[in-house]
Amino acid sequence: MDGKIIEVFNHHIYNIIAAFYIIIMLATIVSNGIVILTFYKVRSLLTAVSFPILSLAVADCLLAVTAMPLGIAANTSRRWFLGNVGCNWYAFSHTVVGLSSILHHAVIAVEAWRRIVRAMATSGTGKRGMIIIILAVWGVVIIWGCMPLFGWSSYVPEGSGAVCSINWKSTRPVDISYVICTFVLFLFVPVIVIIASYAAISHDLQMMAEQTQKNWGRNAQMTVDRLAAKRSQCGRA
């Protein structure tokens, strides 16, 4: 990453990659900008459940503005101008936002489970509680993203040579251990939590439907109203 010409692929391939980066960057800014603007204009939407969505939208916009242009510049010029500092920043920012994304989705899934399946026992997490959870998520992923900067694995050029990421291909034990821990803690565990939460919600809806049909009949107004209320609650969560 010292400014030399990158020659992994034909230069036309790098131009195509840069074009895709531009499209992704613009789409990210526009779509997430709409989300942020909507929450700003319609303050009633700023509920505890919506905080993770807003958090992700802000993070994606910051990533698009501060890191994606580096990838575009590197691919169009086939040079990396910012050396190891730029490489580390690009990889760190993408790692942190990427890991936080799946944790945010896990938070959303658990909160939906609490509000729907555990509705009789809890009204869900309040705004202050959700803010604390989101700050904890960001704290965890920032610390984890810093690990390669302090010797547990490293950030290196990958693929085309024009961008950087975690050192996925290394066979050193220190790199392998970081990759394994990353997959376990930030992929397998959150996915299991998400699947379990939505499976519990689906089971709860099915059991409630069977119970209401048994009590009042399939087409009774009480059954229709209760199922509609439950689905509406699911949508809000």
Image (tube, helix red, strand yellow):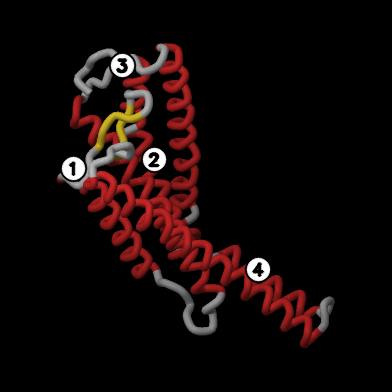
Q: Position of residue 143 (x, y in %)?
A: 23, 53
Numbered tag placed on residue 231 in the rendering: 4
Q: Position of residue 113 (x, y in %)?
A: 52, 71
Return the residue at label 1: 149
Which residue appears at 23% of the width and 46% of the height? 173
Within-10-Å neighbours for mark 2: few <14, some 14–19, many 20+: many
Numbered tag placed on residue 21 in the rendering: none
Which residue appears at 37% of the width and 28% of the height? 159
User: Helix, strand or loop at disc 4?
Assistant: helix
Taking the image as shown, residue 36 lies to the left or right of residue 208, namely left
Residue flagged by tag 1: what amino acid is it?
Answer: Leu
Residue 146 visible in the picture: no
Question: Is residue 134 shown above or below 84?
Answer: below
Numbered tag placed on residue 61 in the rendering: 2
Question: Which quadrant: the C terminus?
Answer: bottom right
Badge nearest the viewer, 4 or 3: 3
Q: Earlier in the sequence, mark 2 or mark 4?
A: 2
Within-10-Å neighbours for mark 1: few <14, some 14–19, many 20+: some
In 3D space, how far apart are the residues under numbered discs 3 and 1 (Cα atoms)?
Answer: 24 Å
User: Helix, strand or loop at disc 3?
Assistant: loop
Question: Is residue 7 shown above or below 127?
Answer: above
Residue flagged by tag 2: what amino acid is it?
Answer: Cys
